[in-house]
Amino acid sequence: MDFLAHLQLSSSNIGTSTGNNWINSTGSEIESFSPVDGKSIGVVAATDEAAYEQVMQTSQAAFEVWRTWPAPKRGEIVRQVGNALSEYKESLGKLVSYEMGKSLQEGLGEVQEMIDICDFAVGLSRQLYGLTMHSERPNHRMYEQWHPLGIVGIISAFNFPVAVWSWNAALAWVCGNVCVWKPSEKTPLCSVAVQKIIGKVFAANAVPEGVSCLVQGDYQVGEWLAKDTRIPLVSATGSTRMGKAVNQTVAGRLGKTLLELGGNNAIIISEHADLEMALLGCVFGAVGTAGQRCTTTRRLIIHESVYDQFTTTLIKAYKQLRIGNPLDASNHVGPLIDKTAVAQYLLAIDQCKQQGGRFLVEGKVLTGDEAYESGCFVQPCIAEVENSYPIVQHETFAPILYVMKYSSLAEAIALQNGVPQGLSSSIMTLNMREAEQFLAVGGSDCGIANVNIGTSGAEIGGAFGGEKETGGGRESGSDAWKAYMRRQTNTINWGTHLPLAQGIRFDI
Ligand code: NAD
């Protein structure tokens, strides 16, 4: 595999790093198996306590220096990081596809997203604006400014093994923070490859060691970050279960969290929809990344007048899906991440049937072909359900699409909002009043609400995140950078008297 050599990965890799330096650790071996062919890609050592301590001390010292670099100079480093990622786009995209299992197009898209957020962050480095206010006291000036927080701990999920880290890191860096990244234990090699690319850029620019750190391990290493009072902000992406645990620990020490958790995203298909366009949006949303995106379309809420017509074409489209090696561009659907995910998919299908679901396209594990040898390939399936079924209320990270009928838009919006999660939502309609009602107060309760596009595939320019059990965090574009900084209000008296606010008199 040429791309592994190009990324300087071998069968045995050191996983802990402070930038350009790699730190030996006696932690247990984490072996990464490709869900594509079941083969071992390589091994990294988990970070042990001594290595973790070294990382933390190095990053603390790095913050003292990095925060004094002017923000546009930090932006210049991020610009070079973006350029380096462009050089490695092909190899890194292939690794993302091979280690995680998403299609090569999506793997390349993930690297493009990293490049895009670097571009965004470069511009941002000259726009970390604070407001100025008029003081009520004469000869006083009042304004606010933004300072970096310190060490940002980044815990990331397997399904976006590189992009979500970059959303955090690129912004955190231009804001003057240093980062400690704990990637998913299911995709450690992607993180090692990225760190090697970054390390070279940082070394060439004499960026202090410790600005970009990497630690490896399972939830226990994530817990170290959550507990560590030296980390003022923990940005955690993953399941709601994980987010609740991290939130409690970090809140217990009055730290800050930025949580990007599970979704249960729905598309409303109105009787006024362009059904052809809706079909494409629904199928890509439901089966892209084999249903393993936080923004995957999990529920379709279809108007009763077009229900039969739309489900018939949907079933037909599902029968045409090509499932196989994601590195082969002719395939639509790749594997699930591992056999545990396959077991959860099967369990969800069973529970759906027990709760009353009727399958329009049956799910199964694919076998009988060399291409399916890893045991991780499954058939995307469709079930007719009620929104109230416990399984429908739950995010199963697999390509299971639930369909249901509605008769009024108010009912459709209530169904769409009637789940514990609140990440992404959309409506397919050509009716302007319907679209506006969906977006208005009392419409979608999600962090993302789209019209005539699916639920997945957000752009980096907008703030990304969701409400309710999705955690409430916002990353990426817009003013998401504010989460990575602390606000300070400054009042300066340049006069010859000391008047007090609110007209209070204090004479001595
Ligand atoms: P996961 O929760 O199993 O793991 C995510 C990360 O958290 C991993 O690095 C893991 O080691 C760590 N972790 C797990 N338990 C922890 C704990 N108690 N303390 C500290 N760290 C802990 O999730 P996953 O299976 O890797 O990813 C899939 C989930 O991520 C889905 O629910 C998906 O919706 C969600 N996700 C959300 C977004 C978003 O932006 N909202 C983006 C991607 C993925």
Image (cartoon, helix red, strand yellow):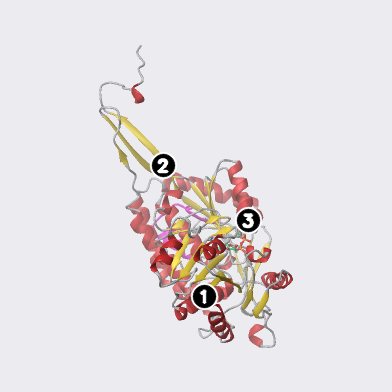
Sequence-wise, the earlier of marks 1 and 3 is 3
* Amino acid type assigned to the residue bearing label 3 in the image: Met
Instruction: Identify the residue position indicated by label 2 in the image.
Output: 487
x 37%, y 62%: residue: 119
Instruction: Identify the residue position indicated by label 1 in the image.
Output: 282
* Amino acid type assigned to the residue bearing label 1 in the image: Cys
Mark 2: secondary structure: strand
Mark 1: secondary structure: helix
Q: Is residue 457 left or right of residue 218?
A: left
Queried whether the magenta region covers residue 205, the answer comes back as yes
Give the residues in magenta: 197-214
Sequence-wise, the earlier of marks 1 and 2 is 1
Mark 3: C-beta under 8 Å from nearest atom of ligand 1: yes
Spatial separation of the CA atoms under disc 1 and disc 3: 28 Å
Sequence-wise, the earlier of marks 2 and 3 is 3
Mark 2: C-beta under 8 Å from nearest atom of ligand 1: no
Q: Quadrant of the C terminus?
A: top left
Spatial separation of the CA atoms under disc 2 and disc 3: 28 Å
x 44%, y 66%: residue: 450
